[in-house]
Image (cartoon, grey):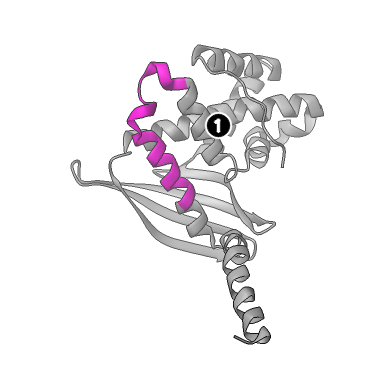
Amino acid sequence: MGRVMRQVLIGCVMGIVVFPPIIAAQEGPTAQVKSTVDRVLDILKDPALKGPAKATERRRVLREAIDPRFDFAEMAKRSLGPHWREQTPQEREEFERLFADLLEQSYYQKLDAYADQDVLYTNEELEGQSAVVRTKIVSKKERLDIPIDYKLARANGQWRVYDVTIEGVSLVSNYRTQFNRIIQTSSYAELVKRMRAKQIGEGTTPAPRRHR
């Protein structure tokens, strides 16, 4: 085999090793959402992670699965609305962490309720650096279709979720309404107090998050 041919073959082998991660990073929004949802469903179905004794470990593994796909900083900002501007950087950081815990729990509970059903990816809407991925959980037993839509924005080749709409209800908008009501009738401090209490009540242990 000539030297030129050997170099070509080596280049092809190196291409196989090097290029797939790059291609994966450039996958469309539906592929990236599907990868995350599949991983979450696998975790929820895993018998080794079932039961109260495994709650902390299960939460940790679930967090590792969805953190790269969800833009919690943007979601926290949107959920607090105009009140976001009034908070210090330290207050924003704490609110983001508390909000992420609340939203994660809500998202897990909804998927867990339908973990044994089929997930269909029905539509993808692209507009510049924004996208909507429409999915549907098909429950054959109950003859129900549960629509779950993901709104995403693209940054550095990755599509990241900034809102989830479940059965027509936006999680971010729903939280924004609740948060605004508490702040208007009481105070921001009271909102944070309730969020901390809910976190303690669920027995969760706050974990540091990587800021993106």
* Screen quadrant of the N terminus: bottom right
**In the figure, 152 relative to 191: above or below?**
below
Of 194 and 7, nearer the camera is: 7
Residue 95, quarter of picture: top right
Location of residue 49 with respect to 75 vertically, above or below: above
- Quadrant where the C terminus lies? top right
Question: Which region is colored magenta?
Answer: 35-55
Left or right: 44 as drawn, with respect to 79: left
| Residue 176 quadrant | top right
Q: 136 or 54, which is in the foreground?
A: 54
Query: Disc 1 marks which amino acid?
Result: Tyr
Q: Nearer the viewer, residue 86 or 203?
A: 203
State the predominant SS element of the stretch in magenta. Answer: helix
In the displayed image of the protein, which residue is found farthest to the front? Answer: 1
Residue 48 at what x, y percent from top left?
A: 36, 28
Mark 1 falls on what kind of element? helix
Say which residue appears at 53% left-offset and 40% top-offset: 66
Residue at the image point whose x is 63% and y is 74% from the top: 10
Corner quadrant of residue 129 = bottom right
Query: What is the x, y in percent for residue 142?
Result: 20, 41
Q: Is residue 107 left or right of residue 137?
A: right
- The residue beneath circle 1 is 175
Q: Is residue 178 left or right of residue 190?
A: left
Q: Nearer the viewer, residue 140 or 157?
A: 157
Q: Position of residue 145 (x, y in %)?
A: 29, 48
Q: What residue sits 59% from the left and 15% below the top? A: 194
User: Picture coordinates of residue 8 (x, y %)?
Assistant: 63, 81
Residue, far left: 141
**Residue 118 is a magenta residue:** no
Q: Inspect the magenta stretch and tell me whether residue 43 lies in it.
A: yes
Label 1 Cα neighbours within 10 Å, binned few <14 / some 14-19 / many ≥20 = some
